[in-house]
Image: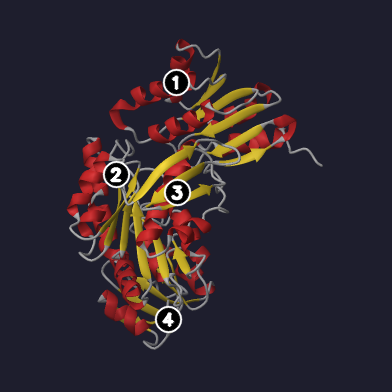
Amino acid sequence: MPPLSVAEVVEATGGSLLRGSPRTLLTSFSIDTRTLAENGLFFALPGSRTDGHAFLHEAARAGAAAAVISRPPQAEMEAPAALVQVDDPVQALWRCGQLARKKVPAKVVGLTGSTGKTTTKELIAASLATTRRVHRTTGNLNNHLGLPLTLLACPEDAQVQVVEMGMSAPGEIAALTELADPDVGLVTNVRPVHLEFFRSLDDIAAAKGELFAKLRPEATAVVNLDDGHVRLQAQRHAGPRLTFGRDAAADLVLEEVEDRFLPGAALTVRQGERRERLELRLPGAHSAENALAALATVLAAGASLEEAASGMRTLEAGPGRGRIHRLGQGIALVDDVYNSNPAAVAAVLRTLSGTRAGRRVLVFGDMLELGPEEALFHREVGRLAAKAGVDLIVGVGARSREAVEEAARCGVHGTAHEPDASSAARGMAGRLRPGDFVVVKGSRGIRLEKVVQAIQAAFPPEQG
């Protein structure tokens, strides 16, 4: 974005300049001294484990020209040359994000949803980037700290910003939507995720629907007609909309899906009289559904159907998000360890059921944040694994035992359970055979990347 002066930071935050020049220009913004760049502004955020004020000397050495603080540093502590004191550094970060949103005229596409947010965001960004300069959310910067940092990092010449919004409590999406002020807003879907923090699926839907409620009247809502919760929540926006789904009345109709891991999913869509077939490098029907949502969103942002599809064809799955590795001895490994929930596991198992392989192997880690019915959700995975023809299921974590035991009751002969990822990683090589097709899926907190790494080390790709 255009440089901010210290004076603009003082005005935006309502703070006071303790020292330094108000004319100092700031070109980067961070809450972590490890990511600070020269002429940066460091926000010294309070925390339960660490306090940013303890790192002011590191911020100075990293090249920070200024810092936002809530209390002056000790006299002997090295600190950035300019210091802006505020009551609440988190609120100051938020207000600087608001200022950044106003200073950069780029169109903003905002999205949330229970599953597929990040993949859909990447598809949208890849599509728009074929004809526009695009800035997007990176990593997991989709919360009350990440979104203002994303807005502050937007280049001055960006034409579109694609921002992802996550939540774990009611009201969060409303606040993020007000900050991002999207021109186009998408809710991908509503699924039983974060039930530990919500009483019901309807409550999750209402929280996700805050995006529609907070859109400007002239902004466009992108509506998934295949999801009844999304369809209902979309009524909270009275402005223009663009719909998608299998419903023939949708603006963008999904006509056909090819559900496969290799070489990737494919879908055929129709907009009026125009049809487009899109072959992806991303696996599974769930990726095709993400691509459908992304296509609709890019159409809402002003692209043609052909333009919308062109940039998506080369996007590959990121680490932990369904990336497929071809290993030695004919083993294929699906690395899907970034996160997990009942709908995502069910989608992966549907794809696995149609996969031709020597054996179908599922390494299944606990699904977290599911609330009091977590045992039921895990047992359902066991039933679905049996239905999908899984030959071997290896559960990882205390909750996954329910899935393993249910799979055995439903006829899966190969079962094993490990208490944690480290233990599972040590034993995986001995459980696999040539030609196996292995899917590793679990919540981030289970750390199943250790299992992926162990399998890769045991079966390196054959040369030549």
- Which of marks 1 and 3 precedes in the sequence? 3
Residue matched to label 2: 225
Sequence-first disc among 3 and 4: 4
Using the image, tell me which numbered label, if any, was put on residue 295. Answer: none
* Residue 192 to residue 136: above or below: above
Labelled pair 3, 1 in contact (Cβ < 8 Å): no
Residue drawn at the location 33% of the way across and 58% of the way down? 144
Work out whether residue 208 or residue 47 is closer to the camera in this orientation and state it: 208
Residue pointed to by mark 4: 3
On the image, the x and y values in percent for residue 103 come to 35, 78
N-terminal of the two: label 4 or label 2? 4
Label 3 element class? helix
Which residue position is annotated with label 1?
382
Is disc 1 in contact with disc 2, using a CB cutoff of under 8 Å? no
Query: Label 2, label 3: how many angstroms apart (C-alpha)?
Result: 15 Å
| Residue 146 makes an appearance in the image | no
Disc 3 or disc 4, which is closer to the eye?
A: 3
* First in sequence: mark 1 vs mark 2: 2
Q: Is residue 76 above or below residue 187?
A: below
Image quarter of residue 289: top left
Q: Secondary structure at mark 4?
A: loop
- Rounded to the nearest angstrom, the CA distance separating label 3 from label 1 is 28 Å
Q: Are marks 2 and 3 in contact (CB under 8 Å)?
A: no
